[in-house]
Image: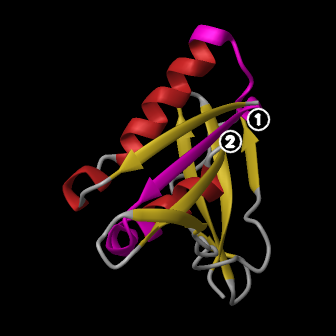
């Protein structure tokens, strides 16, 4: 297991945390020919910086193939770091009831949207000669 640790000590540098972690993990994957599950990325930031980082890091952790974790520095009364606590990342904001389905064919279709009952619709997307239909869930 390889670990990338990004330590951020100011709010302005905390904004760059995801960019830096993404860059270093990608370089590590390429240089060492590692699978994404062999890398853990850790972002350590000051307590106030997590207000800005929490949403972006939570989103990245859900959608990323690496293990991404966040830690909040614990400070004494003089501002000296004395420890760290793991940040509880946010859950997904919306969980669909069921995943949308996609059907592809190579035959041409008309450019239209048709209703399939009251709760879903089908939309058409074309890439070259291939046509894909995606069921869009509305409720």
Viewer-proximal residue among 82 and 6: 82
- Asked whether, in this view, residue 72 is left or right of residue 34, the answer is left
Q: Secondary structure at mark 2?
A: loop
Is 76 one of the magenta-colored residues? no
Q: Which residues are magenta?
A: 31-54
Q: Residue furthest left?
A: 12
- In percent of width and height, residue 135 lies at 69, 65
Q: Is residue 112 visible?
A: no
Q: Is residue 139 visible?
A: yes
Q: Residue at x 59, y 28 (%)?
A: 129
Residue 97 image-quadrant placement: bottom right
Colouring style: secondary structure
- In percent of width and height, residue 104 lies at 73, 42
Query: Of discs 1 and 2, which sits in the foreground?
Result: 1
- Asked whether, in this view, residue 100 is left or right of residue 83, the answer is right
- In percent of width and height, residue 116 lies at 72, 77
């Amino acid at each position: 297991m390889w670990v990338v640790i990004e330590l951020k000590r100011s709010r302005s540098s905390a904004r760059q945390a995801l960019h830096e972690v993404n860059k270093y993990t990608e370089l590590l994957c390429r240089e060492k020919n590692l699978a994404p599950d062999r890398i853990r990325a850790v972002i350590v930031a000051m307590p106030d910086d997590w207000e800005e980082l929490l949403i972006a890091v939570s989103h990245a952790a859900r959608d990323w193939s690496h293990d991404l974790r966040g830690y909040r520095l614990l400070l004494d009364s003089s501002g000296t770091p004395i420890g760290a606590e793991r940040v509880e990342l946010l859950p997904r904001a919306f969980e669909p009831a069921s995943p949308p389905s996609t059907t592809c064919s190579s035959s041409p279709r008309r450019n239209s949207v048709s209703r399939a009952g009251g709760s879903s619709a089908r939309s058409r997307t074309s890439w070259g000669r291939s046509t894909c239909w995606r069921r869009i869930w509305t409720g």
